[in-house]
Amino acid sequence: MKEAEQVVEENRTCGKILTALSWVLVVLTMPFSLFVCFKVVQEYERAVIFRLGRLLSGGAKGPGIFFILPCIDAYARVDLRTRTYDIPPQEVLTKDSVTVSVDAVVYYRVSNATVSIANVENAHHSTRLLAQTTLRNIMGQRPLHEILSERESISQHMKALLDEATDSWGINVERVEIKDVRLPIQLQRAMAAEAEAAREARAKVIAAEGEQKASRALREASEVIGDSPAALQLRYLQTLSKICHGKFSTIVFPVPLDLGTPFLDELKHLDLFNPRNKDKEHLIQIAQ
């Protein structure tokens, strides 16, 4: 412990000496040293300063002008704007053993510039690799029908996992969107055939229900018309009028048998085909 404390004390002493020499150099080379010591970062940037390899107290600097000492200070610029990462299509085997190709978009930004520089070598590259791995893991735990119908919940779940994992890197994942889920051609054809068969089955059921309702309506109509023979004749004439669309249509109108019913009854009583019947004048009058 004593040796470690001595090493730390020596480092502090050496750092103080180098800092003093750097200030002396700045003063001796003024005003030319001002072009080296003053730096500017934009509104969307932050500068993380290292002095003798250690993070400078006070956190990241900016936006605006900040001061560094030559020879002992180094700084790194960090962009705080939101970045978009288009995850390339990932071949995933779903829970029900179906191979699909899934791609997504991740929106993220640096929330802590100091942590993103000090805790991870390349925060952006690490976040992108983690996004690809997380997408494959989530899709592999779900069946195909959930992947196709629950994209919003999958996006929210993926965002929560990425945000939790990248918090120690100073990265904030703002949004995750599933762009597309591409299925194999054979599976697409099978699903299309299944959907078409389901639609045909529904169409047949609907047609059968329509026929059933129509037959009930016709039965009720026949009962109503059967109570009135005149109504049957009117319906018959209405049907003939619908058949005739143009001026040159020809309709063969049969004479209703009901008109000759009284005449036939009279003939049955008279027995016309009997040669012994001598009432010819009466028969002629009936015929006329």
Image (tube, rainbow, N blue to C red):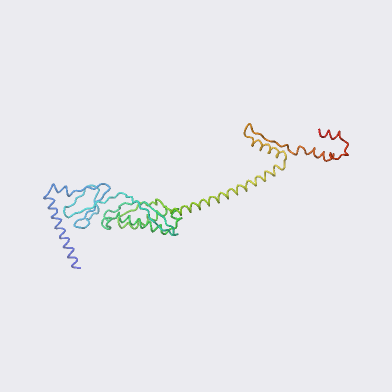
Task: Find residue 7 and report its image quarter.
Answer: bottom left
Q: Going by the image, does 215 lie left or right of 154?
A: right
Give whichever of 249, 269 is nearer the camera: 249
User: Residue 10 location, x and y as percent?
Assistant: 16, 63
92 lies above or below 239: below
Q: Nearer the viewer, residue 37 or 197?
A: 197
Q: Is residue 9 left or right of residue 93?
A: left
Quarter the C terminus occupies: top right
Count of labels in the image = 0
Position of the N terminus by quadrant: bottom left
Residue 229 location in percent, x, y? 73, 40
Residue 220 placed where, x, y %? Answer: 67, 45
Q: Residue lying furthest front in this view?
A: 275
Q: Position of residue 88 (x, y in %)?
A: 36, 53
Image-based side of 198 in relation to 92, left or right: right
Q: Residue 247, relative to residue 1: is it above or below?
A: above
Left or right side of 270 for 96: left
The residue lying toward the viewer, choosing from 184 and 26, is: 184
In this view, the residue farthest toward the left is 28
Q: Quadrant of residue 284?
A: top right
